[in-house]
């Protein structure tokens, strides 16, 4: 396990973090085998672990690799923590608590109280109630050790009351998180959500009624609860309104953002998902631009990669659905973006979406072989992703492509395999059944009159299907790519 963790840590380092680590090691004298191990792992990125292990063992046959790997992990994390202390208020606060505790242990109480005062100010500014409470509790302990000399009773009571209020805030936030986490678990585990949701919804409404004050954290979790609930119900328009409110909350409280602001990026992701689900492609650009603003060097490399990947996927999604294929191809051919999404993120759903929209672009251009090749690559590299709607859409697109390639014998077995896989997860979507029905008609051997009549019927059927919000989870991927019209109007066989 240490080897895998060490690889993940090293490959996530930004250029600035690598420079910081090298600078740290340069300050130390003597031979540093752990730094050589670090270099060897870095040189063998995207290769099997056995490659770098073999290289290291050849160079240092008498060194215990596992012990050295553990030491390298310790040194790296120490350097990274010191870097984060310079960047992040949360790290600064807990580092300050350690310094304050050290001062009290070494009988330097005045210096310790000064540290606590600085921690309290930072924690209050960032609404870190745990930091506020710990600073106040440490201050009270220190004042008690000094027998409260020079302190009036009312001042002591005020400090105690502030600590109590901080604990109350922590409890309120915890209660909101508890309900939100249960909601997410039930959605992810596909439990009997509709039957069991009422207790969560009523509990959340009750908490909100009693606790919805000016606290950023409780407002944030309340809006996250609502947005996830509406997305699960496929009510994307309501989810969009909640996400937009959440984005405004974040943008009005930049001083409270985590570093880096994963929550804010996740909110923008939710807005973009809701916009594409409701076919508001023009409106997506505003939020894509906000994602691009997060790709700045002030954030760590792993966060910037996530922002790059998120922005690129929605940009490609938008370009393909608006039939701007030249713009789509520019994105597809950007090798740096491909490297980030396919090898730098570790986000399976985003990787699947990137494969899917690239294949969809080639499908629309009638470059069926390239589309098929990309989907085969997706099935091989993302085989565990069958629960994601984009994977399902990819399997469906694969069937459409092999029909276009006139592989009539293979298509029947592929449709049977598709049904076996996805009927285990519930009944098929109406759009899936409609596509299979159209393929069964074999439009390539039909005349223009049949195609005209069928096109009108299909358009009406799609309108009826979309009244069922469940259909949107899949239709948002396939509905704007011209699949139905292209299938119906397929060129006759030669």
Image (spheres, rainbow, N blue to C red):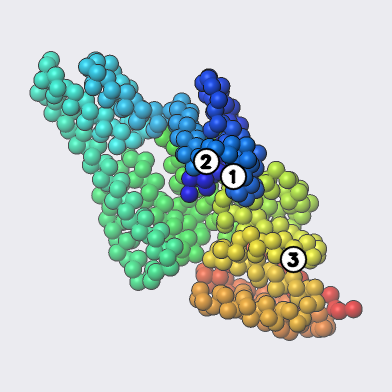
Which SS class for mark 1? helix
Mark 2 vs mark 3, foreground winner is: 2
Q: Nearer the viewer, residue 71 or 183?
A: 71
- Residue drawn at point x = 81 percent, y = 63 percent: 367
> Does the CB distance between marks 1 and 3 fall below 8 Å?
no
Task: Give the Cα separation between the discs numbered 2 and 1.
Answer: 8 Å
The earlier-in-sequence mark between 2 and 3 is 2
Q: Is residue 104 visible?
A: yes
**Residue pointed to by mark 2:** 65
**Residue pointed to by mark 1:** 53
- Residue drawn at point x = 72 percent, y = 48 percent: 331
Quick check: 415 left or right of 149? right
Quarter of the image for residue 340 reads top right
Which SS class for mark 3? helix
> Does the CB distance between marks 2 and 3 fall below 8 Å?
no
- Residue drawn at point x = 54 percent, y = 50 percent: 269
The earlier-in-sequence mark between 2 and 1 is 1
Q: In the figure, 297 relative to 57: above or below?
A: above
Residue 30's x, y, as percent? 54, 22
**Residue 93 bears which disc, if any?**
none
Q: Nearer the viewer, residue 336 or 489?
A: 336
**Residue pointed to by mark 3:** 372
Residue 329's x, y, as percent? 76, 52
Task: Give the Cα separation between the discs numbered 2 and 3.
Answer: 43 Å
> Does the CB distance between marks 2 and 1 fall below 8 Å?
yes
Q: Name the residue at the right extreme.
A: 494
Q: In the figure, 326 relative to 10: above or below?
A: below
The earlier-in-sequence mark between 1 and 3 is 1
Quarter holding the C terminus is bottom right
Q: Residues within 10 Å of mark 1 (few under 14, many from 20)?
A: some
């Amino acid at each position: 396990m240490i080897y895998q963790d060490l690889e993940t840590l090293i490959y996530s380092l930004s250029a600035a973090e690598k420079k910081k680590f090298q600078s740290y090691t340069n300050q130390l004298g003597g031979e540093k085998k752990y730094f050589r191990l670090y270099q060897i792992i870095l040189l063998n990125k995207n290769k099997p672990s056995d490659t770098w292990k073999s290289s290291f063992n050849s160079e240092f046959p008498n060194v215990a690799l596992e012990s050295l790997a553990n030491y390298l992990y310790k040194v790296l994390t120490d350097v990274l923590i010191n870097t984060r202390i310079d960047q992040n208020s949360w790290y600064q606060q807990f580092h300050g608590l350690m310094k304050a505790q050290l001062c009290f242990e070494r009988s330097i109480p005045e210096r310790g109280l000064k540290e606590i005062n600085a921690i309290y100010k930072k924690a209050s500014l960032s609404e870190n109630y745990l930091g506020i409470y710990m600073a106040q509790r440490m201050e009270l302990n220190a004042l008690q050790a000094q027998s409260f000399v020079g302190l009036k009773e009312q001042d002591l009571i005020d400090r105690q009351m502030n600590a109590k209020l901080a604990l109350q805030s922590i409890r309120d936030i915890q209660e909101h998180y508890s309900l939100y986490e249960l909601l997410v678990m039930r959605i992810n585990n596909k439990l009997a959500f509709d039957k069991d949701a009422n207790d969560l919804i009523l509990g959340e409404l009750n908490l909100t009624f009693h606790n919805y004050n000016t606290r950023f954290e409780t407002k944030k979790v309340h809006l996250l609860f609502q947005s996830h609930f509406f997305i699960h119900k496929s009510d994307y328009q309501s989810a969009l309104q909640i996400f937009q409110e959440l984005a405004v909350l974040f943008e009005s409280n930049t001083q409270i953002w985590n570093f880096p602001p994963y929550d804010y990026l996740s909110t923008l992701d939710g807005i973009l998902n809701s916009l594409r689900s409701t076919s508001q492609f023009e409106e997506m650009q505003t939020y894509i631009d906000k994602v691009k603003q997060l790709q700045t060097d002030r954030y760590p490399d792993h966060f910037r990669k996530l922002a790059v990947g998120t922005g690129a996927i929605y940009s490609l999604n938008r370009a393909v659905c608006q039939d701007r294929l030249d713009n789509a191809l520019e994105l597809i051919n950007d090798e740096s973006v491909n490297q980030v999404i396919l090898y730098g993120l570790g986000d399976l759903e985003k990787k699947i979406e990137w494969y899917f929209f690239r294949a969809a672009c080639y499908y629309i251009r009638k470059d069926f072989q390239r589309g098929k090749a990309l989907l085969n690559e997706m099935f091989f590299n993302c085989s565990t992703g069958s629960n994601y709607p984009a994977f399902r859409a990819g399997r469906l697109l694969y069937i459409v492509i092999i029909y276009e390639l006139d592989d009539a014998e293979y298509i029947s077995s592929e449709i049977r395999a598709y049904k076996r896989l996805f009927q285990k997860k519930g009944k098929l979507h109406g759009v899936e059944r409609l596509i299979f029905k159209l393929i069964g008609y074999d439009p390539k051997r039909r005349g223009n009159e049949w195609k005209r009549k069928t096109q009108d019927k299909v358009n009406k059927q799609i309108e009826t299907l979309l009244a069922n919000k469940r259909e949107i989870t899949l239709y948002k991927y396939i509905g704007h790519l011209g699949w139905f019209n292209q299938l119906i109007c397929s060129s006759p066989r030669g």
